[in-house]
Structure formats: C-alpha cells, structure tokens
Image (tube, rainbow, N blue to C red):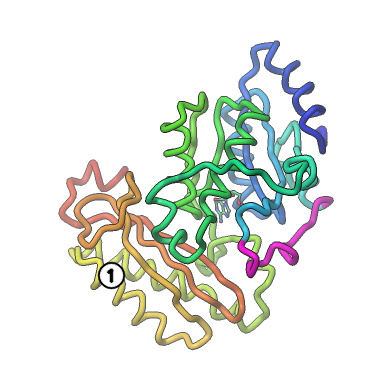
Amino acid sequence: MKMHTTKQSLGAALAGERRQGRTIGFVPTMGALHEGHVSLMRRARGENAVVVASIFVNPLQFAPTDDLARYPRSLEADAALAAEAGVDHLFAPEVAEMYPHGSIATRVDVGPIGDIGEGAWRPGFFAGVATVCCKLFHIVAPDRAYFGQKDAQQLAVIRQLVADLDLPLEIVGCPTVREPDGLALSSRNTYLDPEARRAAPALAAALMAARDAAASGEESAEELRWTVKTCLEAEPGIRLQYVDLFDADSFSARERLDGRGILAAAAYVGGTRLIDNVDVVPAALPAEVRGR
Ligand code: AMP
C-alpha cells in the first residue's frame, strides 16, 4: 500500500493506474478505522482493480461546539488495517492540503435534505460532507465510491449529489456492521466509558423493536417513535435526541410507513452522541419488495 499526503502524489499514481484501464474503487473515511470501514474496503477490493481509501477529519462538517479537536486519530493503526483490507493507495492529507487558505468559500448546497433528521440538529453538516466528498471525488476520480448505511442520510445526500451534479461515478451502499450485542460500530464508540458502553446497545435494540412492530403491521410514525422512546425509558444511561421515519429512497420525512422506510435516531450515551438507523418495511408490502 502506498501512502499519499498530497493531491499531486495521489494524482500521479492514479493517472498511471487509469492509463492501464484499471477501475478505481474509493472509500472515504475520517479514520479511527474499525470493521465497519474495513467492510467497505473489502467490498471495494472485490469489485475494482485499484482501491483508494482516504482519511481526512473534515473541519467543514464540524460545528464549533463539536468534537473536531478530540476526534480519535490513529494513523499508524489505520494504515495497517487498510493495507490488510487490500487498499492500494491511502490518501491522508493535512487540513492545509485540502483547504490551503484555512477554509473554502464554496459550499455544495444540498437543499431540504440538509435541514431534516441529522441536519436539523447539525446545521451545515451535510453541506460540509457534500463539499468534501465533491472535492475527493474530483481528486480520486473513482469509478465507484463506497458508503455505509450506518450513516443512511449521508448516503442519501451523496446519492443526490452525484445525481444532481452528474458526477461520473457509482455510489455503493454497504450494510451496517454491528458488535455482537447490536451496537453499530463507530469511531466515536472509543469515547464510551464502561458504563456508557453497557448502556449503548439499547439504542439499536429500541430501533429493532420498532422495526419488528412495523413488520407486524404498525404503520404510524408516531407509534414507531413511541416504541423507541418507551424502550429507551428503561435505560437511564441514554437520552434520546430524535427518532424519525424517512422514505428509504428519497429520504423525505414520513408520518406513515407507506413503502420501504428508514427509522433513524440520535442519542446521548453519557456525553457521547451516537446515531443509528434500521430499515423498516411495512407488513403490507409484497414479499418481493420486502426482501429487497
Ligand atoms: P466515518 O469515518 O465515520 O466518516 O465513516 C466512513 C464511512 O464508513 C462512511 O461511509 C460510514 O457510513 C461508514 N461506516 C461507519 N461505521 C460503519 C459501520 N458500523 N458499518 C458500515 N459502515 C460504516
């Protein structure tokens, strides 16, 4: 695996790969890699001749009150994991390489999807994500880019970005990797002290209870929200911030489950904010659509 810290070095290496007609798969990350990231890299390895991963903690998507300064960083361990997962080129630029003037004036406006769900609680977050992904897509020029369903709204934002701006790549969504007790893997799980780690799986359990209620015929978003809230009342270590139902394709907010949906939530576990989501499928949907 080759490490690159500059756009120029990565660009020169990839130009050589492209001249030989090799397809490029790309996995953008913020590092502190875990098996969730690794699953994306392995998928990319299986589907492309060349695999590029990036590690960049993007200041543009952090609010001043967010955890930018203390976000976990572990470049050496990350490089070992990426190499083992089959990554050919690891791009780990400094902030000054991506934003030479400290920041940039241009932002990708993602429209209404940026103001709901996560966006309602983190103003500007999805504009920051879309902007850095747009830059990275231009720098890497991949055939395919891989994103986790763990961040379902981010995946929807990126699909919209690529469609709206005619970016010439395919976006591949990959399933959420979980701990055996259901907790979705996340770099921020390293913040959890033992008591918070004990409480944390209750978020996934509550979402899965609501998913089961939907499978048994519950279609009201209010009732599904109520199921999640009630489950979490039994776990004083967790404070739910929001839980909302979205359409699985458009990611528009839904009050009734009238097609494939995504139930997404954020919660504070101790001082750590975690997000998670599950697919919810109405019982009334034909079997062939339910199994998608
Ligand atoms: P991050 O480093 O948190 O920005 O995540 C980089 C990519 O890994 C994103 O596409 C995430 O959705 C994905 N990812 C993070 N956690 C998981 C997980 N538990 N399972 C699958 N993909 C994940």
- In the foreground, 165 or 186: 165
Q: Please provide percent x and percent y for residue 286.
A: 17, 46
Q: Which residue is mark 1?
A: 224
**Residue occupying the point 51% across, 24% down:** 168
Viewer-proximal residue, 72 or 197? 72
For image coordinates 67% across by 26% down, the residue present is 50
Image spot of residue 59 (x, y percent): 68, 54
Count neighbours of disc 1 (C-alpha within 10 A) and say few if under 14, some if 14 to 19, many if 20 or more.
Answer: many
Q: Position of residue 181 (x, y in %)?
A: 53, 69
Quarter residue 264 falls in: bottom left
Give the amino acid type for the residue marked by disc 1 in the picture: Leu
68 within the magenta span: yes
Q: Quadrant of the C terminus?
A: top left
Q: Is residue 177 above or below residue 20?
A: below
| Magenta-drawn stretch, dominant element (helix, strand or loop) | loop
Magenta range is: 63-76
Look at the numbered disc 1 and give the secondary structure of its residue.
helix
The residue at 41%/61% (across/down) is 117
Q: Looking at the picture, how far across and down is residue 244, in whole percent?
A: 34, 65
Q: Is residue 122 left or right of residue 243?
A: right
Q: Which quadrant would residue 84 be assigned to in this image?
A: top right
In terms of depth relative to the viewer, which is nearer, 125 or 3?
A: 125
Q: Is residue 160 left or right of residue 20?
A: left
Quarter of the image where the N terminus is located: top right
